[in-house]
Amino acid sequence: MPINKSESIKKAKNDANEKEPSQEEKKQFNEEENNFKKLRKQIQDKLIKFATRIPVFMYLTDYRERSLHDVITQLEPGLFKKVTGIEIKDFELLVSLGVFNSALMNDAVYKFKRYEDASLVYAGIDKHKGENIGLYDTVISRTDYEQIFENVAEAGINN
């Protein structure tokens, strides 16, 4: 069922207001509306599952120097499917529909990697020293990554 099915449901409601629908039309309308609600719920569940499992995926993958989008779609699609339960074609559909705000996703991935780095360095592990840092759909140099981190830390001290 296409996402724009809600338009046909609205049209059916408007038509129903103009004339009394038959029992068959009412049944069909209710069935379409239930199917639409079911589809919306499935999409919502997949997004929630994605949001809760993407950090696990990021911990499990070793491709920190590549963008998360590339890691998901090109480098480790099998791992992504296994961890999130989402097929790559479904992920690509969500991307094409504009579900993910690139700026917010880049910021979230940056913050995750900053937190992860801090915990790894605390444990004495720094196996990605000097490598570029992949965000959601872009890659930044290690120098830029560290400079942003220092600027954020300084801003926090001054506030």
Image (spheres, grey):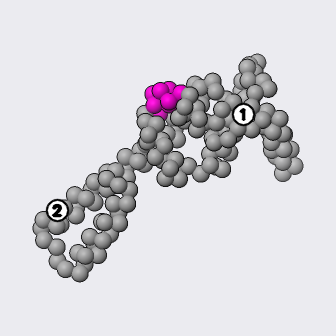
Q: Is residue 110 left or right of residue 48?
A: right
- Which residue type carries mark 2? Lys
Q: How many tags in the picture? A: 2
Q: Secondary structure at mark 1?
A: strand
Circle 1 is placed at which residue position? 133
Vertical side of 58 occupied by 28: above or below: below
What kind of secondary structure does the magenta stretch mostly adopt? helix
Which comes before the other along the chain, label 2 or label 1? 2
Q: For the residues marked 2 and 1, what is the alpha-carbon distance in whole angstroms? A: 54 Å
Q: Is residue 89 left or right of residue 115?
A: left
> Which residue is painted at 26% across and 70% down in the image?
12
The answer, for residue 146, to whether it is visible in the render is: no
Q: Quadrant of residue 154?
A: top right
Q: Residues within 10 Å of mark 2 (few under 14, many from 20)?
A: few
Please tell me whether mark 2 or mark 1 is closer to you in this view: 1
Q: Secondary structure at mark 2?
A: helix
Which stretch did the figure color magenta?
76-84
Q: Is residue 4 magenta?
A: no
Q: Is residue 83 magenta?
A: yes
Is 92 or 125 nearer to us in this picture? Answer: 92
Q: Is residue 99 left or right of residue 62?
A: left
Residue 136 place in picture, x, y as percent? 63, 41
Kindly identify which numbered label has been placed on residue 27.
2
> Which residue is painted at 79% across and 26% down in the image?
130
Do callouts 2 and 1 mark residues in contact (Cβ within 8 Å)? Answer: no
